[in-house]
Every structure is written in structure tokens, then in C-alpha cells.
């Protein structure tokens, strides 16, 4: 079983912090995310809202004080999982753009799911909100995967992280120089967890590594 979470405590902590920091967009996002994810549960059985709340709390612990980034973190699954259009979100353009890039969409020109993912990770570089959000999202998901996914799905995520996400975060240090320290910390945290998972899911990882590399 996974961890137990006190959702009210998490929500109260975040709300108090955001009020004190005068992060108005994130406050709106906190309320909207809670309403949209109401009744939803993750594959590990925990209420879905725990995921964005955990990500936002970790982001604040890392020293992130950007209102647009925290708001994007809280909203990142609202469109993909709650049947909500990005343009309907009552937020500024940077936040809506971040949420849009966080939402995986298949294009008619994509020849495979892997091609879709390659385009998706490349596009993350266009939005610092989406880029940081994806790093936080993947770190949180990697930590929860053993409690929620099949070994095959975990292997796929490990390979995707190594082949697509980590190189993207490395490249992002050149694109977003002001975020280089934060990206370094996130990249190394993700790499550490990913390497541990590789030890336990070696066969599944190697299978998907070959798929992503086209071998």
C-alpha cells in the first residue's frame, strides 16, 4: 500500500502559504483543481487531488515562488482528466499555455505513440511552466509507480524518462538559464529514483528502451 495522506491538512497548508505569498493565480488554481478532481482516485487508490497537492508542496519546498508555475502544477491534469478545455480556464496565457503543453495530444501526422511522446517532450521546452511542472509530475509519479502500475508500465516510464525527459531537462538548462539550478536539482532527483527502479524492473525497462530507440 502507498502512503496515507491528510488531504485537508495539505490543502490548508497550501492555501495558507499562497495567501501569505499573495499568489492569486495559484489560489484560484487550488480551488478549481480541488473541485475538478473531486471524487477521482489514482491507480494506487489515493484521491486524485493528492497528486497536484503533493507536487505543489514539493515545489514550494524547493523554493519555487513563481505564481504561474505553481498554478500550472495544480491545474496540469484538469484538462486531460476532467474533460475541460484549456481555453475555458480562467487564468492568464502563461498558465493556459503550460497546461496545454502538459496535455498529451496525438496529431494526425504522428506515426506512433512514441512519435507523439517525442514531440510532446520537445514542445515542453517552449514553456517554463510546463517544463518544471513535467519534472515535478514525473518525480511524483516515479515515486508512486511501484504501488500503482504493472511492471511493464513501470518499465515503459523508466525508459521514457531516460530517453526523453532527462535529455530534455538537460537541454532546458541552455534555454532557461535562470532555472538552471532548479533544473539541476530536479533532474538529479528524477535520475536517482529512475536508476533505482531500473534495478528492480530491468527486463521491462530494457524491452521499452529498445522500443523507444527503434531497435
Image: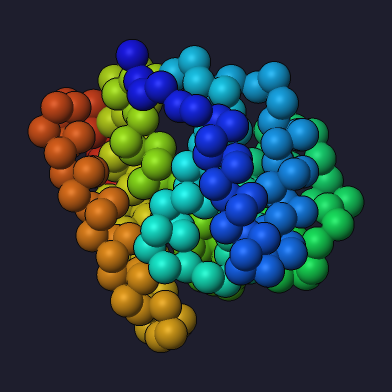
Q: Is residue 191 above or below residue 171?
A: above
Residue 140 occupies which quadrant of the picture? top left
Name the outermost residue toward the left.
199
Residue 40 occupies which quadrant of the picture? top right
Residues 40 and 83: in front is 40
Q: Residue at x 55, y 30 (%)?
A: 7
Q: Is 98 on the left-hand or right-hand side of 44?
A: right
Residues 84 and 90: in front is 90
Residue 32 occupies which quadrant of the picture? top right
- Residue 102 in view, yes or no: no
Q: Is residue 86 above or below residue 143?
A: below
Q: Residue at x 62, y 64 (%)?
A: 20
Q: Position of residue 70 (x, y in %)?
A: 58, 60
Residues 21 and 32: in front is 21
Quadrant in which the N terminus appears: top left
Q: Position of residue 81 (x, y in %)?
A: 68, 33
Q: Position of residue 36 (x, y in %)?
A: 76, 34
Q: Residue at x 54, y 47 (%)?
A: 13
Quadrant in which the C terminus appears: top left
Q: Is 91 on the left-hand or right-hand side of 71?
A: right
Q: Position of residue 8 (x, y in %)?
A: 59, 32
Q: Residue at x 35, y 69 (%)?
A: 183
Amino acid at each position: 500500500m502507498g502512503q496515507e495522506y491528510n488531504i485537508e491538512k495539505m490543502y490548508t497548508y497550501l492555501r495558507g502559504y499562497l495567501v501569505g505569498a499573495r499568489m492569486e493565480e495559484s489560489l484560484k488554481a487550488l480551488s478549481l483543481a480541488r473541485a475538478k478532481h473531486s471524487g477521482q482516485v489514482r491507480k494506487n487508490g489515493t484521491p486524485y487531488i493528492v497528486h497536484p497537492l503533493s507536487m505543489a508542496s514539493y515545489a514550494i519546498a524547493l523554493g519555487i515562488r513563481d505564481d504561474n508555475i505553481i498554478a500550472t502544477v495544480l491545474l496540469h491534469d484538469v484538462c486531460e482528466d476532467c474533460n475541460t478545455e484549456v481555453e475555458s480556464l480562467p487564468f492568464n496565457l502563461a498558465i493556459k499555455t503550460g497546461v496545454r503543453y502538459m496535455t498529451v495530444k496525438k496529431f494526425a501526422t504522428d506515426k506512433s505513440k512514441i512519435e507523439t511522446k517525442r514531440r510532446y517532450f520537445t514542445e515542453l521546452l517552449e514553456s517554463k511552466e510546463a517544463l518544471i511542472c513535467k519534472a515535478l509530475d514525473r518525480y511524483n509519479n516515479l515515486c508512486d509507480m511501484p504501488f500503482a502500475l504493472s511492471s511493464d508500465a513501470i518499465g515503459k516510464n523508466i525508459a521514457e524518462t531516460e530517453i526523453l525527459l532527462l535529455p530534455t531537462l538537460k537541454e532546458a538548462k541552455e534555454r532557461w538559464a535562470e532555472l538552471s539550478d532548479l533544473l539541476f536539482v530536479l533532474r538529479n532527483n528524477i535520475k536517482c529514483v529512475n536508476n533505482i527502479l531500473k534495478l528492480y524492473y530491468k527486463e521491462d525497462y530494457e524491452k521499452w528502451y529498445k522500443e523507444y530507440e527503434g531497435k
